[in-house]
Structures are given as structure tokens and as C-alpha cells.
Amino acid sequence: MKKLETLVDAYLHKGLREKLVLLLREKGITDENVLAAIGKIPRHFFLDSAFDKIAYEDRAFPIAADQTISQPYTVAYQTQLLQIKKGEKVLEIGTGSMYQTTVLAEMGAQVFTIERQKQLFEKTAKYIFKDTYPQVQFFFGDGFEGLPSLAPFDKILITAAAPKIPENLWAQLKTSGKMVIPLDESASTQRMLRLTKKRDGSVKKEAFDAFSFVPMLQGKTQK
Ligand code: SAH
């Protein structure tokens, strides 16, 4: 259970968020909808209370189950590449802290998000923005499988380092849909790719910067 003080979005936090948005602009994020969402979502709600004061630094932090909440720049970068429009169906692989999920929901996406770590999935039952974003649905499972019964999706976002392009996920993408995926390039870095499904089913591949994510792993945990 989080301490009550961490659930307060104080004036201080708002000021820190404004600074973070300025920094993201300086680093090259231009999508105003992405910046507005990051300026609005209280990132400190998604971290352990020990990190409350530094929640708006542009860095990743540990969460439960040895996983991380992505760096704000990475969240902004991936979200910008997705070109989210209101009402789109978005499949997210790697719920983690639910922060990226919430940024997508604030932008008007209908979000379906999968987590393989039971310990993290169990926290989603207490999602504090349940009433604000009723269009978010959480799933416990293996992201390599996707959600065939809910496909097709307009956009697919992978927030862990993928060893290859998951075939099942590609099959669940609409025509003209886009997948943003950090694909393994070396032992420690991934190349950010945006894949667009062309009318004939073939792929248009665009390559962007290198990042470092926790690995996308097969199967789901037992506890
Ligand atoms: N989007 C998250 C990022 C979390 S880090 C956030 O904003 O906090 C990546 C997450 O992907 C981890 O929680 C990890 O457990 C999860 N993950 C890794 N492989 C997965 C898979 N095959 N299916 C679903 N989730 C996976």
C-alpha cells in the first residue's frame, strides 16, 4: 500500500513536471499531445514513495520484480513514433509500472496492456486511474502471443528488448498499422524501429536511435 503522501500531486510535483517537459523538448520531442500527457500524468504515483522527490528526473527507476519504469525520454520517444490518434486500439507489451499505459490512455487511446510478471500484474488491480481511464484493460500473459481474440490493433508498442519481430504480434496489426519495437542489435543495445504494415502485407521499416531496455522474455511467471 502506498503512503498517502505519495498520492498527493503537489505544486512541487507540477513544477518538476514542467521542467521535465522542457527537457524533453530540448531533447527533440515535438509531438504536443505527448508533451501535454507527460505534463499531466503524476509519474511519482507510479514509483515507490522513496523515489517521490526524484520521480521527474529523466531516468529509469527500479520497480518490483527486478523490472524498471522506462525513462521519460524513452516513453516520449516511443509514444511520438506511434503517432497516436484518439480512439485507436493500442496493444502494449510490458505493463511494468503502468506509466506508459497511462500516457497512452491520456492521449485517448484504448489501451490493452500485457505483463508477464505476476507480481506486477497483480498491482494493476489497484490502478489509481481506473475511473479516469476506464478504456484501459490489463492482461497477465506472454506478450509474444499478443491478444488474438481482441485483434486487430491500430498500433503495437513493445516496451522490452525484443530478440526478433514477434510474428504473432505482426499478424495482429491492422493494415496501415504501426509497431514500435526496440530490436536487439548488440548484447546491450536495441535499435528503435517503426514498422508499418503496407496494403500488400509487406513491411515498411524505419530505424531510429539506439536504446537500452530490459529483455522481452518468453512465458509468464508463476508468482
Ligand atoms: N511500459 C513499462 C516499462 C516496463 S519495463 C513502464 O512504463 O513502466 C518492461 C516490462 O516488460 C517489464 O515489466 C517486463 O516484465 C515486461 N515484459 C518482458 N517480456 C514480456 C513479455 N513477453 N510479455 C509481457 N511483458 C513482458
Image (cartoon, rainbow, N blue to C red):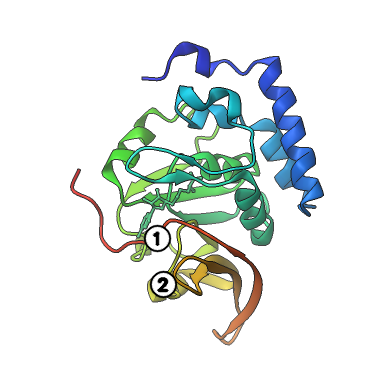
Q: What residue occupies the far left of the structure in this picture?
A: 222
Q: Give the percent coordinates (x, y) of residue 149.
A: 35, 61
Q: Answer with mark 2 or mark 1, whichever residue precedes in sequence.
A: 2
Q: 129 or 65, which is in the foreground?
A: 65
Q: Is residue 34 above or below residue 200?
A: above
Q: Give the percent coordinates (x, y) of residue 175.
A: 57, 74
For mark 2, what is the residue? 163
Q: Residue 31 carries which label?
A: none
Q: Give the percent coordinates (x, y) of residue 97.
A: 45, 39
- Residue at the image position 54 percent from the left and 55 percent from the top: 89
- Residue at the image position 71 percent from the left and 46 percent from the top: 34
Q: Name the side, left or right, on which 9 lies relative to 161.
A: right
Q: Callout 1 environment at 10 Å: few (<14), some (14 to 19), or many (20+)?
A: some
Task: Check disc 1 and give the amino acid type.
Answer: Pro
- Residue at the image position 59 percent from the left and 23 percent from the top: 53
Q: Callout 2 environment at 10 Å: few (<14), some (14 to 19), or many (20+)?
A: some
Quadrant for the C terminus in the image: top left
Q: Give the percent coordinates (x, y) of residue 213.
A: 48, 57
Quadrant for the N terminus in the image: top left
Give the SS element for disc 2. loop
Alpha carbon of mark 2 to alpha carbon of mark 1: how far?
A: 8 Å
- Disc 1, ligand 1: is the CB inside 8 Å? yes
Can residue 57 be seen? Answer: yes
Give the SS element for disc 1. loop
Q: 57 or 200, which is in the foreground?
A: 57
Task: Check disc 2 and give the amino acid type.
Answer: Pro
For mark 1, what is the residue? 215
Q: What residue occupies the far front of the structure in this picture?
A: 187
Q: Are marks 2 and 1 in contact (CB under 8 Å)?
A: yes
Q: Name the side, left or right, on which 132 lies relative to 25.
A: left
Q: How many marks?
A: 2
